Image (tube, grey):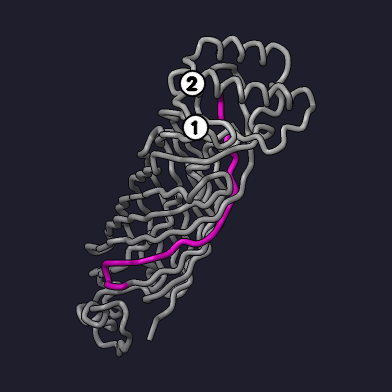
Amino acid sequence: MKKLLLLALITSSLTSMAQGVNREKNEAYKAYFDSLQTMDYDYYLPIYGKGAYRRGFDLQLAAGISPVYFTQTQEITIQSTSIGFNGGQKVDMSSFIEFGPTIATTHAYTVRPDIWLFPFLNLYGILGGGTTTTEVTLLKPIGFQTSQHFTAQSYGIGATLTGAVGPVWIAWDNNYNFVDVEALVEPVPAFNSSLRVGHNFLNPTRPDRSMAIWVGAFYQKLQNDTRGNLPISDIFPSVGTGQNIETMRDWASGLPPAQRLVANQIIDKIEEFGQGNDVGNATIDYELQKKVTAPFNLILGAQYQFNKNWIARTELGVFGKRSQFLLSLNYRFNLI
């Protein structure tokens, strides 16, 4: 079922993984943190930033932009399926069609601008695109698997709440990401939420240079309903002859009248295509109810801050039925 599930395409945890604020009381860094209390801070953002510096907190520079590479593989469960033919009325086929595991593998390339509105609140946007390979297994009425490759655009917004006690910090991130795919009637939204707890290790001679590591949990929820249409020639490119057609016709003969009508219309076109005939713009229209099979998984990450301007980050998602990997380079600067 070629383009049925592009649902985890660019839904990524493009979070503000830095600790945001830091206050280290180790005597080795006393001179550095004391200097923050007397520095001349004339910027508007983050709000209350001057007060944070006066109290000896170290903050990230207010604005940033990050190129991000993200890849993810996860399983999607199809809960119900309605199918129509060539714009006709769709009928519920949930009891008569059976899917096996559906696996979506994503490669996303995005840009993420962000600002620290407060020392504890980061706001960001997501803009980019990517590719996905979707493997769909159909078990009934016939058994076959198809693997297809697609492109899509992605955009979204998010916010991260963060704080620190000495070198230990916590960050709670939430974002909405929308994926625009040609096969779907409208962009598919996804909600991503993640909680991280980490430790920041300052360089002994350069307190503006540090390494942070963290562990956390990632949660994802997709919009339940998806609507679209697919060309007959794209869905069943190699099953339109012989025993497959006989199996599908036997299956269709046992369906209720409304379902049987739609099924036979589709099977006729599949057979025509299998015989080498031009089926024109014949399409299958569909509505799906679906969910992420395992919405939670564990995340492990690290970042290296070269200085106040440059930060490199990486993160790995493991366990559950999702794996993911993120790599980004963040450039930060102050705003007026």
Q: Do the residues labelled 2 and 1 touch (CB within 8 Å)?
A: yes
Residue 30: quarter of image: bottom left
- 336 or 61, nearer to the observer: 336
Amino acid type, mark 2: Ala
Instruction: Please say if 73 is above or below 84.
Output: below
Q: What residue type is labelled 1?
A: Gln
Kindly state the secondary structure of the residue where label 1 is placed: loop
- Residue extending furthest toward the right: 276
Give the residue drawn at x 44%, y 67%: 305
Q: Residue 183's spot in the image, x, y percent?
A: 57, 44
First along the sequence among labels 2 and 1: 1
In the picture, residue 169 is in which quadrant?
A: bottom left
Label 1 CA crowd tier, 10 Å (few <14, some 14–19, many 20+): few
Q: Where is residue 124 in the image (x, y as percent from the top left)?
A: 39, 65
Foreground of the two, 261 or 277: 261
Per the image, is 69 magenta?
no
On the rendered structure, is 64 left or right of 21?
right
Q: Looking at the figure, which quarter contains the C terminus?
A: bottom left
According to the picture, the residue beneath numbered tag 1 turns out to be 89
Residue at (48%, 63%) from the top-left corner?
Answer: 312
Q: Which residue is drawn at 48% across and 18% down?
A: 96
Q: What stretch is highlighted in magenta?
A: 117-138
